[in-house]
Image (cartoon, rainbow, N blue to C red):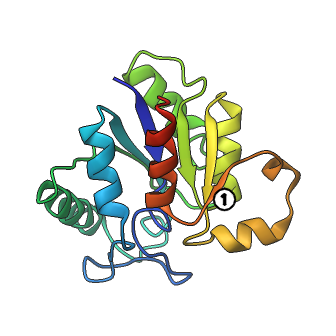
Amino acid sequence: MPLIILDRDGVINQDSDAYIRSVDEFIPIPGSLDAIARLKHAGYTVLVATNQSGLARGYYDEATLDAMHRKLDTLLEARGGRIDGFYVCPHGPDAGCDCRKPAAGLLEQIARDYETDLQGVPVVGDSLRDLQAALKVGARPLLVRTGKGERTLASGAPELAGIPVYDDLAACVDALLAAGQD
């Protein structure tokens, strides 16, 4: 079963520079839920790897984060979709952890848990740090314009060279499924 790894905020749900702090603020990006359901129907294992420094900053607690993920699960279930696993970095940017993207710790944990090499595994993100983490483990970074994607593109970072760019998760999934790649 092929893997795909998604960032959360800005890829699946709307992002905010003020952080997504409550279940009510967790609003799916149009088309993202159906895209995840299509991945599941195509046989993908769908995982989320997300920085959630709002926990360390005290903007919300783990119960609220869990409630956001339960909301996502419920919305996906109605479409025949599912997230197979959530991998969360709860640390702030100055914590020095190895799990906060652009570090590769979350992706390395996925590789261990699924006893696989992430070489060529699609990693969909909207920020440079998502792409940098993917590159560190040999995964295939894919950028979406939603969330912080436009800002990421405007940065002109050298890591962006050759990385495919899609309007949103739905367009990215369309391309992956049309190519029949895993």
Residue type of the residue flagged with mark 1: Asp
Using the rendered view, name the quadrant where residue 125 is placed: bottom right
Where is 86 relative to 1, above or below? Answer: below
Q: Which residue is mark 1?
A: 94
Rendering coords of residue 25 (x, y %): 33, 82
Where is 103 relative to 146, above or below? Answer: above
Rendering coords of residue 96 (x, y %): 65, 48
| Foreground of the two, 178 or 47 | 178
Residue at the image position 51 percent from the left and 64 percent from the top: 168
| Foreground of the two, 75 or 97 | 75
| Foreground of the two, 6 or 63 | 6
Where is 47 relative to 182, above or below? Answer: below
Task: Indicate left or right for 166 with 181 as reference.
Answer: right
Instruction: Categorize mark 1 by other alpha carbons within 10 Å: few (<14), some (14-19), many (20+).
Output: few
Residue at the image position 46 percent from the left and 17 percent from the top: 116
Residue 18 visible to an observer of this rendering: yes
Residue at the image position 61 percent from the left and 68 percent from the top: 145
Rendering coords of residue 73 (x, y %): 19, 56
